[in-house]
Amino acid sequence: MIGRGRWRWLAAGIATLAILVALPSRATAADLASLLASIAARSAGVKTLACTVRQERHLKVLSKPVLFTGQLTVEKPDRLRLELTAPIPSVFLLDGSHGTHCSGDGEPRRFDLGADPAMAAMGRQMTSWMAGDYAALQDRYEMVAVEPGPGVVMTPRDPGVARVIARLEVLFEPETLHPRRLEIVEPGGDRTVIWFTGIVVNGAVDQRVFSECHPA
Amino acid sequence: MIAPQISRKSAFRWAVVLLAVAAASLFARGIEVREDALDLLPSEAVRHDTRALQRLGVVDRVFVSLEAQADPGEPASEGPPARLLQSCERLGRALSRSPHFSEVVYRFPDATALLDQLWSHLPVLMSAADLQQLEPRLTAEAVRKALTEDFLLLTSPAGLLLKEQILRDPLAMAPPLLHRLRVLQGDGAVTLRDGFLTNRAGDACLLWARSAAPLTDSFVAEEVAAVLNQAADESLLPGVTMTVVGSLPHTLSNAHLVRHDLGRLLPVAVVALVVLLLGVLRDLRAVLVVAVPFLAIPIAIALLRVFYHQVSAISLGFGIALLGICVDFALHLFMALSREPTAAALARLRRPVALAATTTVGVFAVLLLSDVPVHRQMAVLAAGGMSAAVAITWWLVPTLVGGGGAPTRERRSRGFVLRTGWGGVRLAGWGACLLLGLWAWPHLHYNGDLKTFDHPTPEIQRDEARFHAQWETSGDRAFLLARGRDLPAALDVNDEVYAALRSRGVSDAQSVAPLLPGPRVQARHRDAWRVFWGARRAQLTADLEGAARELGFAPDAFAPFLAWLEAEAPPLEPRSLLASPLAPLLGSLVSPATGDGGPALVATMVRDAAIAGDEAAALEATIDGVRVVSASRWRHDVEALLKSNSLRLSLTAGALTLFLLALALRRPRPVMAASAPVLSAVAAIGLFGWATGGEINPLHVLMGVMVIGLSVDYGVFIVSAAEGTDSGTTFLAVTLCAASTMTGFGVLALADHPALYTLGTTVLAGIGAAWVTALWITPLLLGAGRGDA
């Protein structure tokens, strides 16, 4: 049996703990501005970025989460190649106004981003997430800095984007401020987590990677 | 005691007239004036066609092309510059907010949203042939391959956006529907970039807006242009320029030019008229006297209101101009009253004034038989107004000019015509002129194209050429208008039109048929869908579930898709598509039935050349409820109708004039003599038309009516003067009347605008010939002895 006085102490303790836990998890606006300024300073010199990715996709329509590994190459302002090598090879390309997805020996599936403004916006934002142009995203997303971080939680302001993304969370390497982990949470609860390792900035990039679609 | 009695009598007359004018003015205020070029068109059928195009916004659409000027400092990019698209969006939004525009298209709807809209209607949009094309994608292997692609897409970044689409349509049946959007875009090289319509070079962006009010109205055009320019000033970013094409710049250009011409020429005409009257008559009262007939204007407009609640500005303007003929009666009265006792002058003039007024009113009344609405309104205005003007003039002018007044200049010029000789030569010359006129008329081409009166500036021509080059648009378009009591019925007809065009090899028609078929086609598609899936559903379910399980999909991942295949397909209601993001695009091709009984319209647009020759007539003959309106065909029809209308009216007016003259003058010689100025005027108009390009247009016909009305008056007055006791004023009065008309209207021959120029030259040629004939030939025809006495 717990006495009434003890209940009060326990409740006060839980409340205090909750406050203590909550407080450090949301940094101040000054922290966010400072973080974004640091990321902007770092990203100013970024022209290309290449890394290894590990992607975990949690979808209700799949029996279990799917884990992929592969390579990501980004060139500012609007070119991206995501090549997943295992378990099933596939390539996703964004190049200006075109998007392409290839797998196996089938015909590439092309997306005319010109005819699909939502897809075009997403394409531009993907390169921004990776290349660090968060200042450009501030008018499209509500941003909050998170601790422990450094990291940013972004909630879309645009209803078109909010239809497909409920929340984004990006965590950065403390030293380099390169993205370390990206979590995309969708409105229905589906989510994707991507880890980035072995980041190479402004390395030599063969331009063909943005046009040759089929997986190696 | 006599003077006060006359004074009281005059005051009474003026009071009655001014009261009538005031009452008429009050009544006339309720009349609604509109500017509508359609009122110049003959035949209800042609007007219907044109109104149909107006309902679809064809006439009132403004096309705006924004162009990004090259900026050397701008980094090179593959697509159009961002400032161009931003400007396009800002301007499109600004125009969308304006109440002056009812529909603004500047960005195509999101493809995902469109697929969401069309997806549930797939069963009524896919034909049996479309379904057959699905067959190879339904084998077990193909289904597995499709699901593998779906799986990979779902797990790619694109999956974020495509997830719902993939689960709803795992076999990707719907995306081909998006290609059907191309048929709504029409011709020209339009490329979608981020939803914006850009040209092939990527340096121009297109948007269009439909004016809420008719752009053929110059006041509306001024307002719309101001709104457009202000929106452009506020929306366009530096380095982006705007080009506007459509009816707007033409209306503005014409209105400005007419205003400029009238501003320049009217003061000249007024000053010249006053100088002429005062110079010849040396009497200030003359200016007052010629103003008297215009008191009939409010009465004429009030009379018009009795018959028409809404009148054309064109008929109002021309009708009032026709009332100017009455100035001639005022001048005859003034000159007679200036030198004769009132009773004697009125007695002498009663017969010629009555006869001249009757023949002129008769000519105007003939216009009531015209197919052209403007003619009928003018007839009421001019015939009614002229009757009132003659009565007012006859009643009031004697109150201004007392009988036997001070001698005026005309006394010194008495008989200046009568002493002229060379009668045979004059008659021979006149006969030759008539023969030449008789020869010229059949050689004239009747041009009924209203573009004849269009005067685009070089800047407009340059803009249009640039627009066509920029957007690679072709020339004239033809409209195939499908009509029905309601929209579904019109869509059924439209489906037949589209199928007929396809069977004739026309593949670039702009039509809603592939996206919005009518109920008949929808029912056919639904039946085909039921049969197709009825035979394949069980196998597909097994293959789909097997492949899904193998790839790691949840067991019920595609259950909604399979349930949908089995469900009864809902019909695609036109209303739902017209309320969708496609509405602005469909608005230019679809117009529901109007509340006042107007039919529903669905238009298909093709290149004019695509249905050249007998194709249009063949389509109309084979498909019930379709009407083909093409620029070339329309011009041909309008010209033929106007030509037959003009011929019929001219012959009727001529016969009526002859009849009235014969009734009044009884003998052939005076009838011939009175008709001579009319014959000369008609011959001169024909000859002038032949000498200046060989064309006559609807304005020649309109002014021709006025010229005939005036010419017959000259003949009547000269015949009366020559047959009766000539006061010596008639010849000078006719000369003064002709000179004043040629001064007032003739200055318009100096106008830059083609319509005003036509007015001026027709009057100069017609009245000039009628005047000379009245003075030199009419007396001869009455009898050389009397004329040359």
Image (tube, rainbow, N blue to C red):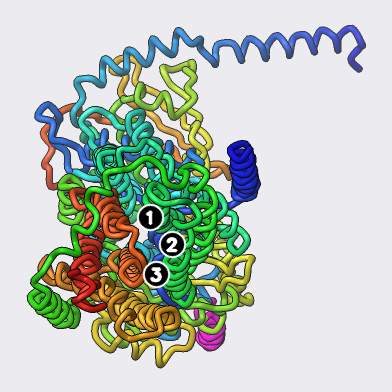
Where residue B41 is drawn, which disc sits there?
A: 3
Which of disc 2 and disc 3 is earlier in sequence? 3
Residue A159 visible in image:
yes
| B129 shown above or below A191 | below
Q: Are marks 1 and 3 on the same chain?
A: yes
Alpha carbon separation for disc pair 3 and 2: 40 Å
Instruction: Please name the residue that numbered disc 2 is placed on.
Output: B349
Q: Label 2 is found on which chain of the structure?
A: B
Instruction: Please name the residue that numbered disc 1 is placed on.
Output: B332
Under circle 1, the secondary element is: helix
Under circle 2, the secondary element is: helix
Whether tag 1 and tag 3 are in contact, CB under 8 A, the answer is no
Tell me where the magenta segment starts and ends, as one range: B522-541
Q: Are marks 2 and 1 on the same chain?
A: yes
Q: Is residue B56 magenta?
A: no
Say which amino acid is labelled 1: His
Work out which quarter of the rendered image holds the C terminus of chain B and state it: bottom left
Q: Label 1 is found on which chain of the structure?
A: B
Label 2: how many residues lie within 10 Å, few (<14), some (14-19) or many (20+)? many
Alpha carbon separation for disc pair 1 and 3: 37 Å
Label 3: how many residues lie within 10 Å, few (<14), some (14-19) or many (20+)? many
In this picture, residue A30 sits left or right of residue A42: right
Measured from the top left, where is residue B517 in percent x and y?
A: 49, 76
In this picture, residue A164 sits left or right of residue A194: right
Work out which quarter of the rendered image holds the N terminus of chain B and state it: top right
